[in-house]
Amino acid sequence: MVVADWGGDPSGLDAAEVLAAAGNDVTLAVASLAVGEGVHQYRRNLYLRRLYRAGVKVLQHHALVGATDGEVELSNVFASELHRRIPADLLVLAQGRVPEDELAPALVAAGLYVEEAGDCLSPRSLEEAVLEGTLAARRVGALA
C-alpha cells in the first residue's frame, strides 16, 4: 500500500499508521520538504517513532504522478524527470485541500474499490478530514 502525502499534515501520517497497525505493508510517499512538515516538531517526532516501529517505509521528496496496473508512479519533487514505480494494491491520497474529484470515478469505472474522504468530497477542516481519512483507512484495513 502507498500513502501519497502531498503536504506533510497529519492526514497522511494517520492513514499510514492505521494501515500499518492493521498489518499492511505501507510506504509513505512524502512530497513535502519533510515528513510531517505541517505538524509541530514534538508531535512529528512521536509520529515518526510510531511509523518506523510499525515498519512503514518512508520515501521522501516524491509526489504522486499516477497509478496503473498495480503500480504507483512517483516523481522526485526536486528533479521531476526522476520517476519511480512502486508495486501497490492500494493507493491512499493525502493531497491537501485542493479537491481531486476526477480520480475516484475513473478508478471505480475501471472496477477498483475506492474509499473517498476529506476534500475530494467537499472542503473540510483538518480535523474532519483526518477523522474521515482515519475511518476510511480502518475500513480498508479491515478488508485486507
Image (cartoon, helix red, strand yellow):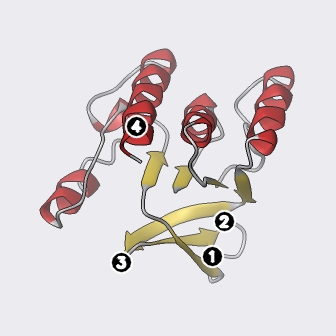
- Name the outermost residue toward the left: 109
Q: Quadrant of residue 19?
A: top right
Mark 4 / mark 1, whichever is N-terminal:
1
What residue does disc 4 label?
142
Residue annotated with mark 1: 80
Of the residues shown, which amino acid type is indicated by label 3? Asp
> Element type at marker 2?
loop
In this view, 88 is above or below 129: below
Residue at the spot 42% in from the left edge and 69% down from the top edge: 66
User: Which one is in front in this view, the residue at disc 3 or the one at disc 4?
Assistant: 4
Task: Please state the total of marks drawn on the protein image.
Answer: 4
- Residue at x 27%, y 29% (from the top left corner): 122
Q: Nearer the viewer, residue 72 or 56?
A: 56
Circle number at residue 77: 2
Residue type beneath disc 4: Ala
Disc on res. 69: 3
